[in-house]
Amino acid sequence: MQVDHPDQDAVRRQWHKERSYFVELLDLHLEGMGKGTAIMRMPYRPEISNGTGAVHGGAIVSLCDTVFYIALASIYGRDQDTTTAALQCNFLAPALPPHDLIAEAKVIKAGRRIVYGEVFVRSGEKVVAHATLNFLNTYPEEKPKK
């Protein structure tokens, strides 16, 4: 996936500075982004593995959710209120050590309300997961008045 963004280094530094505790816990690293795309790395660590030594499916789903948000934000901006509406993740092979996981997200349809896309997750040369996602954009004028 080709990603280039003129302020990529600044965006990456800002993202790492502002990332949430959960994202920090998973040690997710923004590798690159472009309009509607993002690439993220999750280093393999025993702390995120399951009983078989493979990366836990919940960690992989969290990686997919996070990298897709970055792809969405590259279109709408970080101030856009959005939430995950649906995420379907298919696990295709175990993500075994020693490889880090590389997730590549792509927005396929960027509507005003619904944003649809996909994420491929690789461990080494092997695709270990594929996710499709729907995010829901919300707007301040739609919130109920108190």
Image (spheres, rainbow, N blue to C red):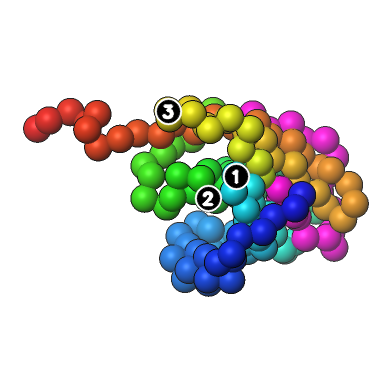
The amino acid marked with disc number 1 is: Gly
Question: Is the Cβ of the residue at disc 2 closer than 8 Å to that at disc 1?
Answer: yes
The answer to whether 6 appears left or right of 113 in the picture is right
Q: Name the residue rendered at 36%, 42% in the picture.
A: 81
> Which residue occupies the foreground of this view, 55 or 92?
92
Q: Is residue 66 visible?
A: no
Residue 97 image-quadrant placement: bottom right
The amino acid marked with disc number 2 is: Ser
Gap between marks 3 and 1 measured at Cα: 15 Å
Q: Is residue 51 above or below residue 136?
A: below
Q: Residues within 10 Å of mark 2 (few under 14, many from 20)?
A: some
Picture coordinates of residue 60, whole percent (x, y): 67, 46
Q: Residue furthest right?
A: 125
Q: Residues within 10 Å of mark 3 (few under 14, many from 20)?
A: few
Name the residue that disc number 2 marks.
74
> For residue 36, which numbered disc appears in the image?
1
> For residue 46, which numbered disc appears in the image?
none
How many numbered marks, from 0 up? 3
* SS state under label 3: loop
* Label 2 or label 1, whichever comes before in sequence order: 1
* SS state under label 2: helix
The amino acid marked with disc number 3 is: Arg
Picture coordinates of residue 75, whole percent (x, y): 51, 45
Residue bounds of the magenta highlight:
87-104
Gap between marks 2 and 1 measured at Cα: 6 Å
The answer to whether 44 appears left or right of 21 in the picture is right
Name the residue that disc number 3 marks.
113
Q: Is residue 135 visible?
A: yes
Q: Is residue 8 above or below residue 22?
A: below
Q: Residues within 10 Å of mark 1 (few under 14, many from 20)?
A: many
**Which quadrant holds the C terminus?**
top left
Q: Is residue 43 above or below residue 122?
A: below
